[in-house]
Image (spheres, helix red, strand yellow):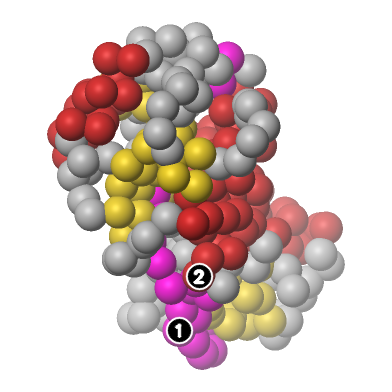
Amino acid sequence: MQLFYNPTITLDTKEILFNKEESRHIIKVLRKTTDDLLTITNGNGFVFTAAIVVPSDKKCIAKITKYEEKPKNWTYNLHIAIAPTKNIDRLEWFIEKATEIGIDEITPILCQNSERKIVKPERLHKIMIAAMKQSLKFNAVKINPIIKLKDFIEVNKKEDIFIAHCIPSEKISLKNSSISSDNIVILIGPEGDFSQEEVTLALDAGFKPITLGNSRLRTETAALTAVQQINFLHF
């Protein structure tokens, strides 16, 4: 299935006008023509079927013939807050793979040991959309602007909140942790790890210290491991 994405579609939308890039892809690459059917999601859990009425490679127009609600295939709400990696490709890799597995929200966080302090949300969103379409997901992942760790902690004081860090201390394994709700927030630190001050700040706010295994993991590997373990616990 070739899945298209258009966040402006609502249940009241009758026709869809594709932009020039998508129109060219539909007509020139996929060789679609009048009455051929397209599958489109708005990223809000709905999939639409539309028939081409104007097969133009510059302004392709399709008429919606039906729609169907497609609930996500995981039952929890997972929010990963991750310090952007120095090599942005590694953060993009995480976003791509986490989207394929199943995640709801990603927030880049600015920490004391962060080597990258600037990210381009538009680029990260584009990576996410490509992964969503490839893996046939119908719910777009929310990608937030970068925020200081302290500010993130202040607005995310929930019940199932965790921090993964490498400082020697007593921790619980995420896969053996007691998760009592469907709303989960996990903090993943930078390549130099969280500082002791940051860990203390998180613990004082109610975050539970966790370990993701015996190996010392890269930032993006730790984040993806957390996504996989939560998925396994709820499968």
Mark identifier at residue 113: none
In the rendered image, residue 196, in percent from the top left (x then y), is placed at 33, 15
Q: Which residue is mark 1?
A: 69
One can see residue 138 in this view: no
One can see residue 75 in this view: yes
What's the residue type where badge 1 is placed? Glu
Q: Is residue 32 left or right of residue 4?
A: right
Whichever of callouts 1 and 2 sits on the residue coming sooner in the sequence is 1
Q: Is residue 57 above or below residue 147?
A: below
Q: Nearer the viewer, residue 7 or 219?
A: 219
The magenta-colored residue range is 61-86
Q: Quadrant of the N terminus?
A: bottom right
Q: Is residue 109 left or right of residue 74?
A: left
Q: Nearer the viewer, residue 52 or 146?
A: 146
Classify 10 Å Cα crowding around label 2: few (below 14), some (14-19), many (20 and above).
Answer: few
Mark 1: secondary structure: strand
Q: Quadrant of the C terminus?
A: bottom right
